[in-house]
DNA sequence: CTGTTAGCGCTTTCAA
DNA sequence: TTGAAAGCGCTAACAG
């Protein structure tokens, strides 16, 4: 059963292909009611569906964007994805999703595949290790937007959390609660910029409050090493009083640790995290967090990308769009 | 700056377009080493990238599939997505992701958009409300695979959990632990089949153990009504001893409720859930669950779909592929 | 108001 | 071993 094409419709309606094409593209202006009707009927009768591939070939636009995240299993990525998909759906764009697993090679491969597929743009949580490629895209004027991190030396806009305030908010809250010996654990998976900014915010807030920085209270570890790192950090004297978890995964490791070696939260150790937790509100104790507006971030990125695609120069081509974190006070500190 | 096309490469390498095409498709058999080399160089020199859209138009295959989930924010969907994307990546397929939000209209729209885009197949967590459309696809021999639910009267294969055993496993565990008055709460969002099967498994196991079924212990509610439903169920006399949560969202509602009205788990109320929880192991108490292999389910669906696409008749065209649940015993019952 | 024509970039006979 | 030519399904001048 051959697919019905525009030619079939034209024939059936006794008009030319171009007229049908006009119709499809809603350029009715100069179209006789009668022709219009005949085309409508033909389409109906033949159950005709335009072939978007053919159209794309001609128009050089696919109404499709690619999104490359580190891992769609991460909460942040999922929310970002959802926001992007929602926004794109509105605009009748489709999104192709790719997991680069923080692997530069895979990222590169995906970018190339997406470009071969002629996607109209890419939203990327960049590994940061394909600087050359990023720049090529930018120079070729190919629409790209970064999420969650800035890449040094690449003039592609980034949409991300104001990491410094996030850490500041967390640490200041801890200090206000009377804690002084405060640690921070971030995880290796998180991009360099993000980690640096959070640690920087942490340090700055400590200093502003006249608290000395103790490097033994600062750790950056891959998830599998957090338990050990925690052990170490907790044995440092003077004993640490509170910990800021750099993200959700880290917080979960801390909670696991606390359960295993019974440590009471917040009596023995106060905790606060960056990133909301699905169980934050009903955990015992409920966990205080600094939430990041992942959804808004995703939406903004999609908005930016589509406006680049549609060549509407964005209001002001900022290079970094920072989103404010929100402190959600509960009982873990 | 015009994009370089196969014609440019041909010209640069002083061969014809068709020869370049041969090269691109790795049909080297009759190609002189020299020609091959010249083409290689030309591609390199011009930084040529084949245009997949043009190729698709000709070949009638896009190497792209669509995946329509209810909501990518749901844990299950996320895992399924990840598995599908992994599998497709191996096979050099791309995946377009869509959130239908359990909305038949949106689902329909997506299916049509995806078909217009000429995707080679679709994996669908069906709302179940577009039976006609499902059948059209099936009759047109368009590759489709369902996940998580069966649609009555539609001969499309489904990949899903063995829901009945999942409920059975949970209830039997509860009974073995000495509980007799056992309730079940499922949520409306979950598809009809899934819910029915789980409730059916629950009842069957109760009966097998000679325990009478009490309809007041069975509730199916939308998430926002679970708190109230719980209140009601817990006031029924004789007092319920244990609850089976039909999925992760339901379990979280139960946990919230228990925290608010202080109910000790498992002393006052034992709980067990279907679906693993990110916090299951370190919650206090750790939550016993029956986990479903979402990843395997996604992988299998992708495998099935690609084999349909590649027209390898699957080993045996089963219409339902059931996956075994796994009981993870912890401390909540 | 509608039809003719010429491609978009690639693949694929078929012939040379 | 390579090239010429036709065509995938659609759009877009430009005529008429």
Image (cartoon, coloured by chain):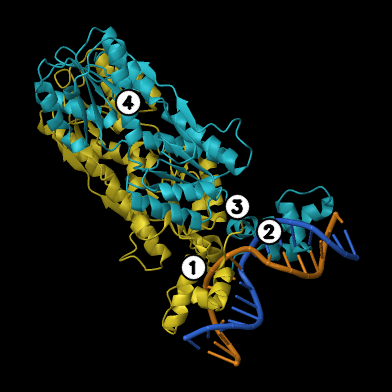
Chain colours: A cyan, B yellow, C orange, D blue
Q: Quadrant of residue B116?
A: bottom right
For marks 3 and 4, give the CA distance.
39 Å
Q: Nearer the viewer, residue B146 or C1?
A: C1
Q: Label 2, secondary structure: give it.
A: helix
Q: Please tell me whether residue A233 is drawn above or below residue B68 in the rendered image.
A: above
Q: Are marks 1 and 3 in contact (CB under 8 Å)?
A: no
At mark 1, the secondary structure is helix
**Residue named by callout 2:** A45
Q: CA distance from mark 2 to mark 3?
A: 29 Å
Identify the subunit bearing mark 1: B
Q: Is residue A41 left or right of residue A221?
A: right
Residue A6, percent across and down? Answer: 68, 62
Which one is closest to the eye, mark 1 or mark 3?
1
Mark 2 nearby-residue class (10 Å; few <14, some 14–19, many ≥20): few
Q: Do the numbered discs 2 and 1 sit on residues whose CB atoms are within 8 Å? A: no
- Can you tell which quarter of the image residue A72 is in? top left
For the C terminus of chain A, give its image quadrant: top left
Residue at the limit of the structure toward the front, as seen here: A153
> Which mark lies nearer to you, 2 or 1?
1
Q: Is residue B148 visible?
A: no
Residue at disc 4, secondary structure: helix
Q: Which residue is mark 1?
A: B43
The answer to whether the residues at label 3 and label 4 have Cβ atoms under 8 Å apart is no
Determine the CA span between mark 4 and mark 2. 61 Å
Labels 4, 1: one chain: no
Reply above or below: B217 against A57. above
For label 4, the residue is A198
On residue A61, the disc is 3
Disc 4: which chain?
A: A
């Amino acid at each position: 059963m051959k697919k019905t094409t525009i030619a079939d419709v034209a024939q059936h309606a006794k008009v030319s292909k171009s007229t049908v094409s006009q119709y499809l593209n809603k350029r009715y202006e100069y179209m006789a009611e009668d022709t219009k009707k005949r085309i409508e009927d033909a389409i109906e009768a033949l159950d005709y569906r335009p072939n978007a591939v053919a159209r794309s070939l001609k128009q050089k636009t696919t109404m499709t964007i690619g999104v490359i995240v580190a891992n769609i299993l991460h909460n942040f990525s999922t929310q970002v994805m959802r926001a992007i998909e929602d926004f794109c759906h509105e605009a009748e764009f489709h999104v192709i999703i790719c997991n680069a697993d923080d692997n530069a090679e895979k990222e590169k491969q995906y970018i190339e595949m997406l470009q071969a597929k002629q996607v109209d743009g890419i939203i990327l949580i960049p590994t940061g290790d394909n600087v050359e490629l990023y720049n090529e895209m930018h120079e070729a004027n190919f629409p790209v937007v970064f999420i969650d991190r800035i890449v040094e030396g690449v003039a592609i806009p980034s949409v991300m959390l104001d990491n410094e305030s996030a850490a500041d908010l967390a640490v200041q809250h801890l200090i206000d609660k009377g804690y002084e010996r405060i640690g921070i654990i971030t995880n290796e998976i998180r991009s360099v910029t993000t980690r640096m900014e959070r640690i920087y915010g942490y340090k700055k807030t400590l200093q502003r409050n006249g608290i000395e920085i103790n490097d033994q209270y600062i750790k950056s570890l891959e998830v599998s090493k957090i338990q050990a790192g925690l052990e170490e950090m907790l044995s440092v004297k003077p004993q640490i009083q509170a910990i800021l978890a750099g993200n959700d995964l880290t917080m979960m490791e801390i909670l696991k640790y606390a359960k295993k070696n019974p440590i009471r939260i917040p009596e023995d150790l106060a905790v606060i995290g960056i990133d909301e937790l699905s169980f934050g509100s009903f955990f015992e104790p409920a966990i205080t967090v600094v939430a990041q507006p992942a959804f808004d971030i995703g939406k903004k990125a999609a908005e930016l990308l589509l406006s680049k695609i549609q060549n509407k120069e964005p209001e002001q081509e900022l290079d970094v769009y920072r989103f404010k974190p929100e402190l959600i006070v509960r009982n873990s500190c």
